Amino acid sequence: MTEVMKKLSLIVCMCFLTTTLYAQDKPSNQDKNDTTDLSPMIVVAYKQARQLQEVAADVAVISAENIQNTQSEDMAAALRYETNINIEQAGNRFGTSGINIRGIGSNRVAVEVDGVPNAKAFDIGSYSFATAQYPDVSVIQSIEVLKGPASTLYGSNALGGIVSIHTWNPQDRVSSGDQWRQIRFGFNGEYNGRHGTYTHAWNGEKNGVIFNINQRDGKGMQRPSTLADDHADWDQQSVFGKWVTDVAPGHQLSFNVQAQQRDQSTQIHSFIGQGRFANTTALAGDDSSESQKLSATYDFMLNKHWADDGLIRLYHSNTEFLQKTAENRFSRRDTPLLQDRLFSFEQKTLGMEANFTKQFNTGDWSHRLIYGVEITQTDVAEYRDALQTNLNTGDSTNILLGEVFPFRDFPLTDVKEIGVFIHDEIDLNEQWTLIPALRFDRYDLDPTRDALFDNNAEDIAVVDIDESDFSPKLGLLYHINDYNSLYAQYVRGFRAPPAEDVNIGFNIALFNYRSIPNPDLKSETSNGYEAGYRLILPNQRLTLSGFYNEYKDLIVSRAPLGIDPDTQALLFQSQNIAKARIHGFELDHQWFINDQWQTHIALSWTKGVNATNDQPLNSVSPPKAVLSTQWSSVSKKWHSGLYGRFSAAQDEIDLTQEELFQTPGYAVFDWMSGYYFSPQSHLQFSINNLTDKTYWQWQQVRNFDAEDPIIEALTQSSRNFSLSYSQQW
């Protein structure tokens, strides 16, 4: 850790120690403050609503109020003031590729929206990247992030954690017998974008409806670079609707629909003619994506000996990407060429979830039990096409670098998953709670080859995968008194091999490269240990946690195997060759000083080691701290906040790899302010990156060579301002 971060850590520790001692001396002075934010209701940890002090895990909660106060207009902005939760980026063109929690990302963190899983990201290179998609922030009620392995409740995809997004219900926005409307529009200087949204909620005696439409556009991130500017012209539309009906006392049925589409045209200028793009004279992308989620949820009372109540959810989701790339370049013989590439990716999921809860006593012990089953079927289809045209002769060919287009990189794949779990909270007495849990998962991957796959991989065999695993968990919670508690837990994580690793098939004849499937590919597993201390006072909350996670059989995609003695081809195969250890600590302190002032301090330090070569893990971000101070006027009309983000330099990288770019440390400040003309009329404005700092996020550039000219084009946004206005009635 750098000297700057050490000093910052010392300051943070002194601050929270001082404020904690002060609060313990006078715990009742702030009883009048609303403590909802200090002990929010958490659902993601146990799949049941629990107050934070009842949870034996580290959970971050970003409320709609936080999103509004920080003027966050997308998922990346909503998470930027969290430590050890980092957005993985795929550049100006492709955007957010995933979420990294405590050094684990790349589809190893599950994301769900109202209980419906998000589609996974997919990257094959060659301008082909199906990235992550999230609901518009205007419909988000809260974001809950459970850090660390969460496979016991959420199955194969939650090896690194789970991000659970909850959208608004009608009753959250308006009381019974009334309706609520809001219009909001504004400008976001980070990407020169405009946004406008309309939300309408109505809540009757037995029925409630909420509806939202949203339009956004932008020009791409504005970066402080001496290179030529890249141009990204995009627009996005989204629709959200939810109908909730009380069919009988204790029985509620809800229907949820979410749809989003995005179109983007990108012109790349920044690195044309440099490095590996030395022969490229023009590069443009034309991309479109769309997603739909439909779900029906039935929440009901049973009052049976085997269950008090239950929940059944049915859902269907569909995500599609279509990306077109046009590249003008010269061949090695200086022949002008036009290369047109197309990438298509589609993922469809049909799923069912049924959960049941039961409270009962065994002697002096009280139990809060939840058990259930989840079943999903996912169909994944992908293909690429290309055409190269000689601009001198007009001749065209569908063979590029020895690959014959069109083709699939992996066969049509059907994935069936079933998970059965049981989770209990056993109150041994008023102070001790034991939390045992167990889940069984069955994973069946069934590929189907067709002419498109055989077009470039006819002699490559495809394999099925049939995996199963148990994921146990054991937690312990100790309430020292009404304010203080300790917790500890052990959780086992599990991730089944994804389709793109099992049967990846490419055959690049020009370079004599060839991939082969791996029928022995095993599931990734983890053993996670965590302990923490939590203090919740009427006006303060302090959380201190430490964790140690061991990962086994991590899958390395398309690892080089060596030369095939028969064909002399360089072989690639996804393999279980990586073991890793990640440990660290996190501190979070929030203080409502009085009705006008509040502060927030957070700090994280994480270290990861590749156990196979004893080198640092490049997926782990450097230490980070967040400090903020927020103020509101006595009249509550004015409010303002200063937010600081601090990161150490990245000096922990794998030295056995090529010399990678190491991000320098940074300190970035954002200022937010707003004014209420009336309780229904609100103006907000902000200046982001106040000091116009040039800096990089490690998760966006961690795989780039130190001399790569693209690095300068991947800085974060320069100083910018944002403005928004909302009116409700």
Image: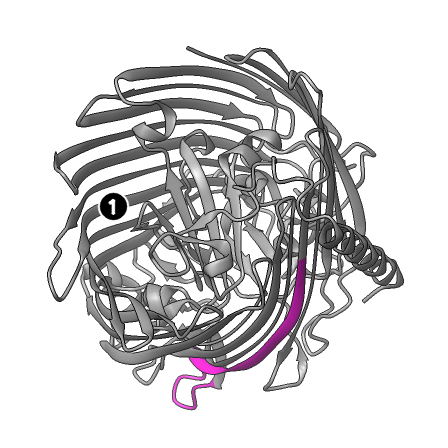
Name the one closer to the observer, 523 or 723.
723
Q: Position of residue 66 (x, y in %)?
A: 57, 36
Residue linked to disc 1? 317
Q: Can you see residue 332?
A: no
Q: Can you say which quadrant of the picture contains the C terminus?
A: top left
The type of residue carrying mark 1 is: Ser
Query: Image quadrant of residue 636?
Result: top right
Q: Main secondary structure of the magenta part?
A: strand
Q: Can you say which quadrant of the picture contains the N terminus?
A: bottom right
On whether residue 241 falls in the magenta region, the answer is no
Residue beneath the point at 67% across and 85% down: 614
All told, the count of numbered labels is: 1
Q: Position of residue 210 (x, y in %)?
A: 29, 25
Name the one closer to the observer, 663 or 164.
164
Residue positioned most to the bottom: 565
Q: Can you see residue 114?
A: yes
**Left or right: 512 as drawn, with respect to 292:** right
Which secondary structure, mark 1?
Answer: strand
Query: Image quadrant of residue 215?
Result: top left
Residue beneath the point at 61% across and 40% down: 31
Residue beneath the point at 52% across and 48% down: 61
- The segment highlighted magenta reads 563-587
**Left or right: 649 as drawn, with respect to 238:** right
Q: Position of residue 374 (x, y in %)?
A: 22, 62
On whether residue 585 falls in the magenta region, the answer is yes
Q: Is residue 538 above or below residue 557?
A: above
Count residues near mark 1 (Cα–Cα under 10 Å), then give few for <14, some for 14-19, many for 20+.
many
